[in-house]
Amino acid sequence: MLIVHGLSEPRAAAGETAVPTGAPALAGSLLPAERMVAWNPGLMSVGGIPNRTTIYRTLSPTGKDDTSAIQAALSSAPVGQVVMLGSGTFIVNEPLLINRPVTLRGAGAGTTRLLKSNGARARTPAVIAGTSGILTPVDPSSYRYDPKPVIIVGPSRWNNGPDSSASQNLLVDGAQGATTIRLTNTAGLRAGDVVLLDEASGASWQATPAGFPGAAKVWQGDRVAWNMHDPVQPGDDNGGANAEGPYDQTPGVLPKSMTWFARPDRATAEIKEIASVSGSAVTFTSPLTISYRISHQAQLTPYSTDPNSGGHAANNLDIHIAHAGVENLSILGGADGALRFEAAAYSWAKSIEVTQWLGEGVAIDNSFRVELRDSHIHAGSWPQPGGAGYAISLAWGSSEVLIENNILVDVCKNMVFRSSGAGSVVGYNYVDDSFDFDNPGWVEVGINASHMAGSHHVLFEGNLSHNADSDYTHGNAIYLTFFRNHLTGQRQRLDDRSGIRTAGLAYGSWWDSFVGNVLGRPGRMRGWTYDDPSMRSNTALWGRGGVGSVWMLGYDPERWTMAPDPKTLATVIRGGNFDYLTSKTVWADGLPAQPLPPSLYLNAKPGFFGNLPWPWVDPTGDAKLQTLPAKARLDAGTPFAVAPGATQ
């Protein structure tokens, strides 16, 4: 196995057993071709997560800080071997760096605990009034903590992004579905390199929908809508604006927010692995999920030198760390996230618990084909907007990621995708009880791929969540597909008072598809309306249709006087969805009634379902819902148990 090149090694190395998890499947003409990609995320293309059996060293907790001992074992373990942590609590007050193809494995989540004792604090024993068992958080401004994560998978903690000094222009457009592009210069590129493709937004001032305050204009391209306006609006990501564009303090200088999670003004992006280079042609191991246009200054950018790397990588290039894993342990106290994948590829976290953290429970940045599965991420320390309490975050172009069979509950946001996610799948997770501590009655977004401009072509399949949505907080996301999910419209343990919906799309959410979902709960839909009244009247009547709405599309949560975004309504596809308000399976938006495939990314029943029926969501069958393994595990109080007959 190699750290730098040859990332897509087809099978496990000696001493490992490859575990197949499935293979991609497209569903013919179910949706327009531009909405469908060959979803084959995570480690599916290489036979799944390897089952490494050779133990290099077994460590036990000392009662003191164990960081140095664990790090020494990780740094010296032979390729493909396991550093095993025994039962008990290991104090880890400096980040563990996994920058080699080895596995850090515990004796089981809840049994092996990695604790950052000077990090984020646990919730108090008091239950938040009006909730069922949600514990009160402690404001991190009330105590001192060391702002560091617990584990980093990647070359280093910082500066693992693309090297813009080496960007190369595309000679011709890169076509969606193609595996080959052409560049002006391919010098230095070689098979096995992981690279970034992106394009400029091409934004200009555009009109806003009717009812937008002051008829302000929005900075918007044909794919990207930034949350920036002229004149500047409350909540905007720009400090100022003039006729030429948005800025912060200096006219003509792009707002800093355009660089938070992407190269400047290049939010539409994806990460690819090079299969071969011949002349001007660069061929990738997977097809492009969207086109990259020379009219938008499309470029390919390599990843290269990191001054913090200590020269560990070949040719002084600090590029993606491959085939590294974290398994079977709990992580507590992370204070700049808990587990971070920073420039990782074909790497994973499996059967882990993450709790008591600030930032992101699991962050996936600048990474390709990372897999997070079979895990329990819950009870973040500070469930407040602003980045302190997210369960999962994808950012910086991270692509072809698999998030499967997890439990994600009791956080501010269950997941955010920030200028990332192309070709990724969020499959068969239980996602619930997201809330803002300052306003717990507002129903936060559940499954989604939003929270910054640029995310695109993410599949959500087989999940159970209180809703699906796509926010506009820092810009829009496009081409999201929601297939065979159960969207209840109601959180499990919180009192829902506003923003109640099973499926929503905020302003700027374009070309999204909802197919084969089951919406609402039987016997729990009294007083609901099907479409929010604003969608029928094209005026701002948000939330006036009753208790909640099955569909709330085109809204702007910062500006309730705005009519629905007409492009959101014109481009959404809703077909084959059953709801418990009308008790009908509705086909609409030009999608004809037709049989539904079992999956859009699997060719067979996944092993973690065991003897349970699959697909578990069937909007056209007599039994609409069966059992989701992740929800059953949590309900039983055994979040890491496997279903009967499972091959997980």
Image (cartoon, helix red, strand yellow):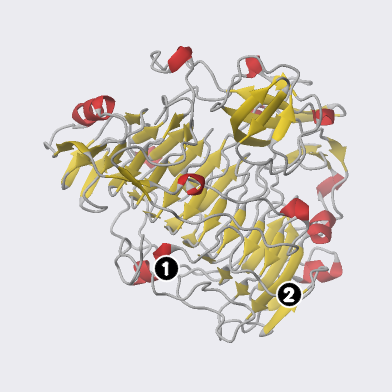
Q: Relative to 451, is 560 on the left or the right?
A: right
Q: Relative to 541, is 263 on the left or the right?
A: left
Q: Relative to 626, is 289 on the left or the right?
A: right
Q: Which quadrant holds residue 147?
A: top left
Q: Relative to 359, is 32 on the left or the right?
A: right
Is residue 87 positioned above or below 271 on the image?
A: below
The answer, for residue 406, to whether it is visible in the render is yes
Image spot of residue 207 (x, y percent): 88, 45
Residue beneath the point at 66% across and 31% down: 283
Label 2 Cα neighbours within 10 Å, binned few <14 / some 14-19 / many ≥20: few
Quadrant the C terminus occupies: bottom left
Image spot of residue 212 (x, y percent): 82, 51
Image spot of residue 442 (x, y percent): 57, 61
The residue at which mark 1 appears reads as 609
Question: Residue 22's mark?
Answer: none
Residue beneath the point at 58% across and 41% down: 399
The residue at which mark 2 appears reads as 594
Give, as a three-letter code, the residue at label 1. Phe
Label 1, label 2: how many angstroms apart (C-alpha)?
26 Å
Mark nearer the N terminus (1 vs 2): 2
